[in-house]
Amino acid sequence: MKMNSIHSCRKLHPKPEGLALQYGTAGFRTDAKHLDHIMFRMGLLATLRSKKTKSTIGVMVTASHNPEEDNGVKLIDPMGEMVTAVWEGYATQLANTEQDSLLKELKDIIEKEDIDMSEPASIYVGKDTRPSGASLSRAVLDGVSSLGGKTHDYGLVTTPQLHYMVCCCNTHGCYGSPTVEGYYQKLSQAFLQLTQNASNRTDDQKRLLVDGANGIGALKMREMEPFLRSKLQVVLSNDSSSGKLNHMCGADYVKVQQKAPQVGECCCSFDGDADRIVYYYTDSKGCFHLLDGDKIATLISTYLKELLTQAGLNLQIAVVQTAYANGSSTRYLEDVMKVAVCCTKTGVKHLHHAAQEYDIGVYFEANGHGTVLFSKAAQKQIQELVKDPNTNDERKRAVKLLESTINLINQTVGDAISDMLVIETVLAIRGMSVQDWHAIYTDLPNRQLKVTVSDRRVIDTTDAERRAVTPEGLQDAIDSLVKKYKTARSFVRPSGTEDVVRVYAEADTQENADRLAHEVSLAVY
Ligand code: 16G
Ligand code: ZN
């Protein structure tokens, strides 16, 4: 055991005294200046997690859609999932321990988890394009080697690529080969196979404007393009290293500002680490139309449900949403599509876990983060049906499409590149334009606001964050405000990533949604 080397190495990554940070909804995230010691310590913790699980663990250095000056880090568990809640707790403890008790804190974790320190450890490390990424990822590598762990530094990768790589490694290649090239090959092969079924696509239908948020997604899209053999013509914008990451571009900007950073008939935007995507277009009158995570979930679940029916497979499909899902999408899925809808708390890990409960769980946050999970049993049924010689042609076509679609989806986490290819496939196979897709249902006008309060933790929520339990009287006040409007809904929740309370309102008109959001935010003060 090389615990002693921590003593010497830790001096290189000292913790500023008194600084306390929390492993939040998506890891640590703050101004990059404050993160050196956090990175080193996450290297240490990832090594312990690897020894404990006897598997490869991932460490991704990214702050997603935050400004370029920020950075962050999150740990990836063996199957490519987010690390468990208990280990999130260890991460916070370890991050906030003052320098002289670091060793004691490590020993506590080792004891609590009964970790055999003679086990080997293997850590995959990746980073997005932030200027601070290079030195911060070196701090992670230092942490791992302090405890004698082995590292594989993938350098610049998207967050979902690193999740994919970790899963490939721990499933011994069953999920694919753990290289960036293996990722491109797996996805592009599935995409080419699927789009063969839509041979009459025009060049216009193959053309897509992609806003890369001046981040890693743009870089990786350019690498992937040759693998797609002109079956998709990607026109990249915000792809430069000179442009500022996430500045006036990217998925978060488009969703929150409801504005297009580029004008065209079919556009999409990635976020800074390419795990989120939204689509949009500008019509002939110059009006902007957004197709967010709810629209994506509707498109994909409708397509999958149709294939299940054609294949004669009796598998349960459900859509997992959060309180932010537009009411129209929920109504459409439940009433028209007859698909089960489940609502969870905000944050990918909550949606992911809920989706694992179904044969096929489609999950998307309205902000564009999401994917589809197929249970092992469902995948087996699909594979067996493909091989069954008694399957008739119509069923065989449907089940083969299902099989290739599974290969096109990154089941470890939401993935902008994979989601984009799935969406392009569905539109191609169903012969739909982005305008047809948009017309499936009409979003209810909505508004999101932020309110700054002295302590956001006084607000506690229940029912997947849709109702406030404390402070007393707040929910009654919201209820009576909502009653004044038609088809209205509103909720408040403390943010998990910023020191603010978020307010959401939807109603029959934009004016009413704006007014309701404003009134509710006054009730929060
Ligand atoms: C994080 C979450 C995202 C969630 C957002 C909510 C992950 C990978 N990301 O970015 O899913 O929508 O936080 O932020 O889990 P909020 O709590 O500030 O509203
Ligand atoms: Zn992201």
Image (cartoon, helix red, strand yellow):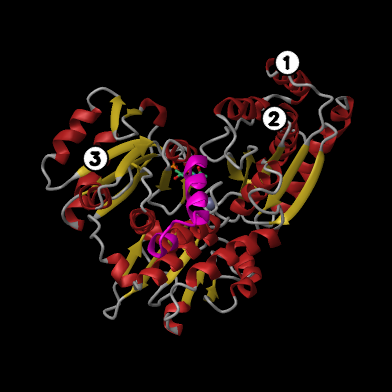
- Quadrant for the C terminus in the image: top left
Q: Are marks 1 and 2 in contact (CB under 8 Å)?
A: no
Neighbour tally class for label 3: few under 14, some 14-19, many 20 plus, Cα within 10 Å: many
391 magenta-colored: yes
| Amino acid type, mark 3 | Val
**Which mark lies nearer to you, 1 or 3?**
1
N-term mark: 2 or 3: 2
Q: Is the magenta stretch mostly helix, strand or loop?
A: helix
N-term mark: 1 or 3: 1
Looking at mark 3, is its residue's CB closer than 8 Å to ligand 1?
no
Name the residue at 42% across, 83% down. 202
* Real-space Cα separation, disc 1 to disc 3, in angstroms: 48 Å
| Amino acid type, mark 1 | Glu
Q: What element carries label 3?
A: helix
The residue that disc 3 covers is 520
Direction from residue 39 to residue 230 in the image, left or right: left
The residue that disc 1 covers is 111
The residue that disc 2 covers is 53
Residue 188, image x, y percentages: 59, 66
Q: Can residue 49 be seen in this view?
A: yes
| Amino acid type, mark 2 | Thr
Neighbour tally class for label 1: few under 14, some 14-19, many 20 plus, Cα within 10 Å: few
Residue 4, numbered label: none
354 magenta-colored: no
Q: Give the range drawn in magenta.
A: 374-396
Considering every residue shown, the one lying at the far front of the view is 390
Direction from residue 243 to residue 314 in the image, left or right: left
* Real-space Cα separation, disc 1 to disc 2, in angstroms: 15 Å
**Which mark lies nearer to you, 1 or 2?**
2
N-term mark: 1 or 2: 2
Name the residue at 59% across, 52% down. 160
Q: Which of 471 and 123 is in front in this view?
A: 123
